[in-house]
Image: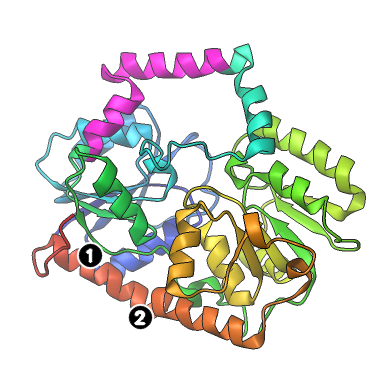
């Protein structure tokens, strides 16, 4: 069966290309949506399966109409991909590979994802007249383009989905519980393997520094300001606070965060603003024996997996579905709300605890396991295996 993939220029695109080609060789076309079709791809290798079109243009949708395919795979349901799903002229099966941010309209994910200090900053930015006007104009333009507002278009597109894979199983259960228009069957899929993440890392490589990592991107959902407020109450003299701000959008938020970080911690505060090659980024993660991942929703799983493998001690919001899922599975992770204190922040994971985390990661994200997930997905969609109904 022939697959058309709607995807973007991301850290995971090459992996998606490789694994689908292993499972369904020669039958995959990838439409990479970009903001500037004349600029080279930054994260994706150009191959004969890759086609580039500017998002939200007639050329993007005309390409979809021109391709002969049986299966449409949506990698993250962006608003313009929802348009593509709703305008399909072909009778095809649709697979939605959820990333997390694209299920924001559930009750669970539409709750307040910001903790108090960060929420105050975000509200201040959002309440500016310029921000409100831009948001309204975007929605109005979307209505002119599609005849419906983004939320209605998204709901219509999701109702058409036949198969769905979420990053963690709990998210699929949320969709089934909260969306009466969601009718998709569950399929398995993961975007990365332990072996791929650590191809430049030896099996005996572990954390070797005492840095503190805060969040994974510019996105305020990392709740950076609340993390910094808590760190200010702890004894962390001489420890670097490393904050990745080289990924995502939100320059006004980033600038406010950098200003606050230097005001509170001086030279201890280390904002990362440039993209790093993967080997260098892993080296950076190795320098952090503590990580604060305070997302209230599923996010930053790539970083969390890497940190667990390297032996970092991770503190997460206990409201996060990732936290509850990992704890249920037996991973050694900690609650930001109740367990982040002077004692715990200065005690590393034991060798046995790191070993347990690694064993559980291999069980879920080992190369053979991830490849088998993708093969199972392809077999289910082709009718060679049964899906788990919702």
Q: Is residue 5 above or below residue 123?
A: below
**Residue 312 sits in quarter:** bottom right
Residue interval drawn in magenta: 132-158
Between residues 156 and 320, which one lies in front from this camera angle?
Answer: 320
The residue located at (60%, 81%) in the rendering is 354
Which dot marks residue 377?
1
- State the quadrant of the C terminus: bottom left
Residue under numbered circle 2: 368
Dominant SS of magenta comes to helix
Query: In the visual, does 56 lie left or right of 91?
Result: right
Residue reaching furthest to the front: 338
The residue located at (91%, 52%) in the rendering is 267
Q: CA distance from mark 1 to mark 2?
A: 14 Å
Q: Is residue 73 above or below residue 380?
A: above
Does 144 lie within the magenta span?
yes
Q: Residues within 10 Å of mark 1 (few under 14, many from 20)?
A: many
Query: In the visual, does 192 lie left or right of 332?
Result: left
Is residue 224 in view? yes
Answer with mark 1 or mark 2, whichever residue precedes in sequence. 2
Residue 151 picture location, percent across and down: 33, 27
């Amino acid at each position: 069966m022939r697959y058309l993939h709607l995807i973007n220029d991301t850290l995971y695109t090459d992996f998606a290309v490789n694994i689908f080609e292993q499972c369904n060789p020669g039958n995959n076309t990838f439409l990479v949506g970009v903001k500037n079709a004349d600029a080279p791809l930054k994260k994706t290798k150009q191959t004969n399966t890759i086609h580039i079109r500017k998002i939200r243009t007639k050329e993007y949708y005309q390409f979809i109409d021109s391709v002969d395919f049986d299966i449409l795979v949506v990698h993250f349901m962006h608003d313009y991909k929802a348009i593509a799903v709703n305008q399909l002229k072909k009778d095809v099966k649709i697979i939605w590979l959820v990333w997390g941010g694209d299920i924001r309209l559930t009750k669970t994910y539409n709750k307040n994802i910001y903790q108090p200090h960060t929420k105050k900053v975000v509200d201040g930015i959002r309440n500016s007249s310029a921000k409100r006007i831009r948001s309204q104009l975007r929605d109005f333009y979307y209505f002119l383009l599609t005849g419906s507002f983004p939320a209605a278009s998204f709901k219509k597109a999701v109702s058409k989905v036949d198969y769905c894979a979420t990053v963690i199983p709990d998210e699929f259960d949320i969709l089934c519980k909260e969306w009466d228009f969601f009718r998709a069957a569950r399929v398995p899929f993961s975007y990365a393997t332990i072996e791929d993440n650590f191809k430049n890392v030896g099996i005996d490589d572990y954390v070797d520094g005492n840095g503190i990592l805060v969040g994974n991107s510019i996105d305020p959902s990392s709740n950076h300001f609340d993390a910094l407020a808590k760190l200010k109450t702890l004894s962390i003299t001489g420890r670097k606070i490393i904050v990745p701000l080289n990924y995502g959008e939100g320059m006004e938020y980033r600038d406010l965060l950098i200003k606050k970080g230097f005001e509170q911690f001086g030279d201890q505060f280390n904002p990362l603003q440039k993209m790093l090659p993967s080997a260098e980024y892993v080296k950076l993660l190795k320098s952090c024996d503590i990580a604060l991942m305070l997302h209230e929703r599923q996010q930053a799983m790539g970083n969390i997996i890497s940190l667990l493998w390297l032996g970092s001690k991770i503190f997460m919001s206990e409201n996060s579905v990732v936290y509850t899922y990992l704890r249920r599975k037996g991973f050694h992770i900690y609650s930001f709300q109740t367990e982040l204190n002077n004692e715990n922040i200065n005690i590393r994971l034991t060798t046995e605890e790191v070993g347990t985390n690694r064993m559980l990661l291999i069980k879920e994200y080992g190369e053979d396991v991830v490849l088998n997930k993708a093969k199972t997905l392809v077999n289910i969609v082709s009718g060679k295996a049964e899906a788990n109904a919702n």
